[in-house]
Image: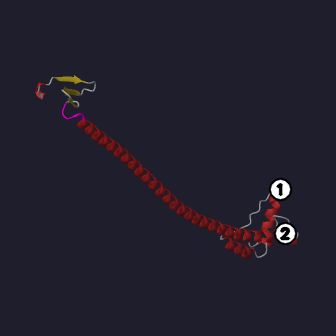
Amino acid sequence: MTSNDVPKSVSSDDAGDLSYSSGGASTSTGQCGGGSKTGTTAHTNSSSISEELARKESQDVCRLRCLVILVLAMTAAAVSVVIYLTTKKGEDEEFETQYEAATKKIMDSFADILTSLGSISGLGVALTAESVDYQHHWPFISLSNFQERAGNARHLSRSLFVATSPLVELEHFEEWDEYVSGESNQWM
């Protein structure tokens, strides 16, 4: 018998591979035929290596993306912190400068107020001293050189007008009217 005369048998396994056997030699083809079992294994090994490389490359790309996103997030955070600290420092310095200027202005105003009150209170002290020295009772007091004393008080206090306006009770009104109309108060 020649090799052409050898009976051939065809079998199929579960994976769908077809096997041919003739005499003592056998060949098998992968799914859909074509090639030997050894070729299919090489193709399968090559395919699994390609798949493994593709999977590894995908993981590496994913890791690289995560690393880039992490670096971008850290850079954004660092830039934000630097800008915040720089802006905060500038605003704090500006606030302190404005605060110091405002407090200086207030303190200067208080000094002016004290000078004003001091000059007006000096006029009050002079009126009190006049009543004690001459045994007069309020409001029956005429301050000597009132115009000059009031002028100084007006100038120091930056006032437009300085006057004494005593509150006279109704029971003392007639006595007050005689006092104002008297000789010692002709300047009024």
The magenta-colored residue range is 33-37
Kind of element beneath mark 2: helix
Question: What label does residue 51 carry, if any?
Answer: none
Kind of element beneath mark 1: helix
Q: Inspect the image, locate mark 1, and give the three-letter code of the amino acid beneath it.
A: Glu
Question: What label does residue 131 carry, if any?
Answer: 2
Q: Residue 161 is drawn in which quadrant? A: bottom right
Q: Which residue is mark 1?
A: 171
Task: Give the foreground label among 2 and 1.
Answer: 2
Q: Main secondary structure of the magenta part?
A: loop
Q: Inspect the image, locate mark 2, and give the three-letter code of the amino acid beneath it.
A: Ser
Q: Magenta stretch: residue 36 in it?
A: yes
Q: Give the image's coloring scheme.
A: secondary structure
Position of 8 with respect to 67 (left or right) is left
Q: Residue 101 is drawn in which quadrant? A: bottom right
Indicate the position of residue 42 as horizontal and vertical percent values.
26, 39
Q: Residues within 10 Å of mark 2 (few under 14, many from 20)?
A: some
